[in-house]
Amino acid sequence: MGDCSLDSTPPLIISPHFHVRRTPWSGLGVYTSDVLPRHTPLHTCEHPAAHVVLREYKREACAWCFAYQGGRHWKVSDAGGAVWFCTAECRAGWAAWVGEEGKECWTRVEAWAKGVGKEEEVGGRVEGNGHVPPEEQEVDKAWAAADEVAERIRQARALDSGPSKQTKAQRRVLSFIRSKSLPHRCPDTVAFLLSGLLTSTRHPTLFASLNRLTASQQPHTYSYPSELHQHTTSYLVLLSLLPAALLPSLTPALCRSLAARDTHNSFGIWSPDESDDSRGAEMLGFGMWPSASFFNHSCAPNVAKDRVRRSHVFKTAREVREGEELCISYLGGEERTLSRKERREKLAFGWGFECACPRCTAEADEDRKQDGPDVDASHRSDSR
């Protein structure tokens, strides 16, 4: 997954059981320091630096601990119905994490999202729509254009509570950005960027750990033009809605940093869980737990990753030899049961690499015996 520069900064994860070092195929990997029995606790990541519970699940997935009970609607809510909770204790945990200003942000965003209308929403992540990923020059151009509009929004917002009145043109800009007519409206992307923004202002140490992850080294940060436009549009929507005190912190650089790290460092928030024997799971959302991003992928992982409430907990799935790389599966739920071809397509789309882990290699060898060579053994099962 993500990479970290090898400088004097303390590592994000420290353990007597393993160490982080460069791999022969570039990037970092986690390697055992001794023989580890099965079920050895390895690491726990407590909070996501940025995340989103998909809007279609907002009443069914607790906004704090992500608890989900087969589509049952929770009864406790906050921020004008933006977030729902399984218990009052979870609501209190969320409120303490985001603060009063954060609660006001979510209230304003929810009022806007309700106005969008379900039939007009754009999905947060779409696979396989046939579009070519935008080149970096196109990305730069799109963000430059967005920043021109952003400057007009900032000028209008500066007059929100001042003695001067907004001009007709300024009111028109704000009205359009907040309206149903705005193309590429995506409440899920707005929520994801808002989550990252609030972490940057309220929990700067956690956000700094996210920024220490190397941004995507693949040629494309955004998979499709629509995804790029969702992000630039969401940036403008947030500028038009959020309390004035937060506007200086909301920048294209922050939004692009979140997108670049989300590309290969996000984990799905799955229901019922993410254990290796999970079947029929649904992805309720996704998020970035920075210290978890050192673990590389294998379709036959030796590390089990489980979500325990808000945290991700990592344990050995079998006995692991000294010096062996510790790998997790980036695939969730029934994705793990896909064929080799389907797994590799999924991994290539989501993380930008063609898997050649031991399981894929063994299956490829078997296929080669039957159909002839079809695997490039130079590919390795990590995304960095």
Image (tube, rainbow, N blue to C red):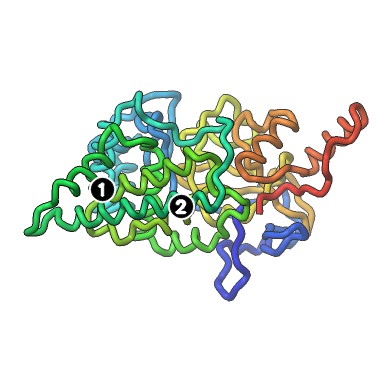
* Secondary element at image label 1: helix
Viewport quadrant of the C terminus: bottom right
Extreme left residue here? 163
Q: Residue 64 has which mark?
A: none
Residue 167: in sight, yes or no?
yes
Residue shown at 63% from the left, 37% from the top: 331
Distance between the alpha carbons at the discs numbered 1 and 2 = 21 Å
Dot 2: few (<14), some (14–19), or many (≥20) neighbours within 10 Å?
few
Q: Position of residue 236 (x, y in %)?
A: 32, 47
Q: Residue at x 77, y 55 (%)?
A: 324
- CB within 8 Å, label 1 to label 2: no
Q: Secondary structure at mark 2?
A: helix
Amino acid type, label 2: Lys
Q: Which residue is mark 2?
A: 141
The residue located at (34%, 42%) in the rendering is 90
Q: Is residue 114 left or right of residue 21?
A: left
Disc 1 versus disc 2: nearer the observer = 2
Amino acid on which disc 1 is placed: Ser
Of 325 and 145, nearer the camera is 145
Residue that label 1 marks: 240
Please give the count of numbered marks on the rendered protein: 2
